[in-house]
Amino acid sequence: MKKIIALMMALCMVFALCACGQSEAPAEDAAEAPAEENALADLKLGFIFLHDENSTYDLNFINAAKEACANLGLTEDQYIFRTNIPESEECYEAACELADEGCDIIFADSFGHEDFMIQAAKEFPEVVFCHSTGTRAHTEGLDNYHNAFASIYEGRYLAGIAAGMKLNEMIEAGEFTADEAKIGYVGAYTYAEVISGYTSFYLGAKSVCPTATMEVTFTGSWYDETAEKEGANKLISNGCKLISQHADSMGAPTACETAGVPNVSYNGSTIDACPNTFIVSSRINWAPYYEFVVNAYLNGEEIPADWTGTISTDSVLLTDVNEAVAAEGTAQAIEEAKAKLVSGELQVFDTATFTVGGEALTSYMADVDTDPDYEPDTEAVENGAFMESKFRSAPYFDVQIDGITLLDTQF
Amino acid sequence: MNKQSKGPLVHIVKRGSLPWYAAWGIRALAIVLALIACALVTTVTTGENPIQVYAAMIDGAFGTARKTWITFQNMSVLLCISLAVTPAFRMRFWNIGAEGQTLAGCLATAACMILLADKLPNWLLICTMILSAIAAGAVWGLIPAIFKAKWNTNETLFTLMMNYVATQLVAYFVILWEVPKGAGKIGIINQSSELGWLPQLFGSKYLLSIIVVAIATILMYLYLNYTKQGYEIAVVGESERTARYVGIKVEKVIIRTMAISGAVCGLAGLLLVGGINHTVTTTIVGGRGFTAVMVSWLAKFDPIIMIFTSLLLVFLERGASEISTDFGLNQSFSDIITGIILFFIIGCEFFINYKISFRKAAGKEG
């Protein structure tokens, strides 16, 4: 008896499934209908985030999205936030659902979302898809799929100056000798974005503290609090005097606070949790990009396949310097270097400032067009500097320069 | 003198079997109570209107055609893994390694798609994927089974550990096949050529896994209830000694059943990678290997009832995720809601199996 009823219920469900599959099919077509009038009042934005506010990385995006929506004067029903969307088919489904709900522009924030965003962009040609940190827009040739990044290496360089000055201060105080000025860096993967980040940070530090060296460890994850904490502790026990990181949890900053080692942070200020060790933090401000895309969409202007925010567009920001920890004059030194970067007088990857295998870098073929064989395809050294973020927005600097030791490169 | 009142105030008695309508009545009541409890928690902690929250849950699971399809697709994967663990559970073999067995199937599928895409014609590639996914899952299930049968190792620990081995293997291959260099992710495999992608049925990319699992459900139901092997599983589960006495080779049954268990997990892995995600990550199974244990238990190891329990769990998950979007609540809140509902559903089984009787007021007369 029980079995028969169960079977009948199962059958009912199968029919119900077929029924709703058929009856709702036209509704889907309606949702895909093109919206030609690009008026602000009709605009709807969708945002896809990898985690929620608990990740410093996503918090940075969420704040920017809120700020941009407020600046544009959008009402609450004009934007949808989808948090905790993993880098899998769920990202594609989330993008499609947002398109179904009438979103005109859909943003995603995580590198691993890219393939799934492209998949959705092919299915919804009327909807604009904008993916931060991705690499494939310039080769994919889709009119409605765009990448964006910011010249965060400039921000890292400036933060590096703060680090170098702190090292100098500690050397002068007699805490260690100039030769022992070693920086530790907790990275996620041996990915170009990370390499570009720690190299620019190191070059910034070296510009004020010439004897500085660096050790880098990798965690194999963009967000792994335990591994990041362990990594920072390992670097500290190896004799690193100052730590910075490129991974998204509070692992490294809290390890530094516990050990009393100065820390240069990323993605935003960590001063609340680490008042005694936090120096400064660089971050990308995504609000200008969001506003740029929306305005371009409303005015019917073309959105470039790659958009690179700079210091001038307010896309690369540094938090306030923590005067309690930073060396004297840090804020002023940062301002001076910033002005030089904006004017072009200073280049972060100036080939005169670093060597590779003991020799100056005169030519380097970078892997700008993503392919499974990592084939180098573009000459990136021009006029005595490595041209980062010129040929695509996402970083492609992956050169191993002298003075930096990689501890574990299995990731 | 009231000697009768010396007994305890509350007395728990094991019930005989309840009529089916009474059992389902208790379950329905549990769900109603769960919803009331959730409503209270929602109103007190967030100030949101609970009715709207429930409406949002239904909207999240069935709000549009696409959402309905995704719900059924997710359900099919969860149901497939639940079907896989069921024969082992019926045998009282506590296989909590479905996560790893599915992951092994995922990895085998992805390996074929990456390494053989330009070497084989597409139909042959897909056949290779099917065979290797099922074989990989089966091997992952066989290893603990052989150890259990030969040396009586603890299958719960063994299958659990195999999950971590599978995760680490996938982590290794993700780094090996990552695109671009250092990215730590594979991305969609053969995105432009779609080689090795399982075909779409009737133009719907969601239908294939639903149909495959529907067939698997019927086959599993028949296998467990109407075949000699299914009966052997039940006998071994009831009592190994009885099984030996009647001449069943217990070792053989354990090994064979776990091979089937693993193979069905491998099938789920094939659907996940070849049909749905077209990529592999360490988290692609997403804990469904463990949720499947709950699905199977809630349904008392009956494949047909599992259709409903898997739908319930997927509904809760999808609805909960919608709540966090609509009301700007943290994902943790939806986990709380899911937890409360499951607590009531699992808890109500107690009242189906046991009766609570209170001390009779008769003693007061004295």
Image (spheres, grey):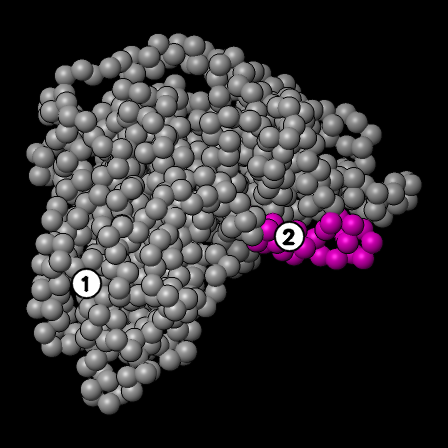
Return the residue at label 2. B162
Q: Is residue B83 or residue A173 the one in the foreground?
A: A173
Chain letter behind tag 1: A
Q: At 36% across and 43% down in the image, what residue appears?
A: A378
Pointer 1 local density, CA inside 10 Å: few below 14, some 14–19, many at least 20: many
Q: At 53% across and 19% down in the image, what residue appears?
A: B200
> Does residue A61 show up magenta in the picture?
no
Chain letter behind tag 2: B
Asked whether the residues under the numbered discs 2 and 1 touch, taking CB atoms below 8 Å apart as contact, a structural biologist would say no
In the rendered structure, which amino acid carries the disc numbered 2?
Met
Quadrant of residue B47 within the rendered picture? top left
In the rendered structure, which amino acid carries the disc numbered 1?
Leu
Quadrant of residue A266 within the rendered picture? bottom left
**Looking at the rendered structure, which numbered label has been put on residue A158?**
1
**Where's residue B359, x and y in %?**
51, 49
Magenta-colored span: B143-170
Both marks 2 and 1 on one chain: no
- In-image side of B20 versus A33 (left or right): right
Quadrant of residue A341 within the rendered picture? bottom left
Q: Is residue B229 visible?
A: yes
**Looking at the rendered structure, which numbered label has been put on residue A298?**
none
Q: Is residue B109 or residue B85 the one in the foreground?
A: B109
Q: At 74% across and 45% down in the image, what residue appears?
A: B142
- In-image side of A244 versus B207 (left or right): left
**Where's residue A191, x and y in %?**
40, 52
- In-image side of B243 versus B178 (left or right): right
Per the image, label 1 sits on a secondary structure element best described as helix
**Please, is residue A104 above or below residue A344 in the view?**
above
Pointer 2 local density, CA inside 10 Å: few below 14, some 14–19, many at least 20: many
Q: At 60% across and 30% down in the image, what residue appears?
A: B118
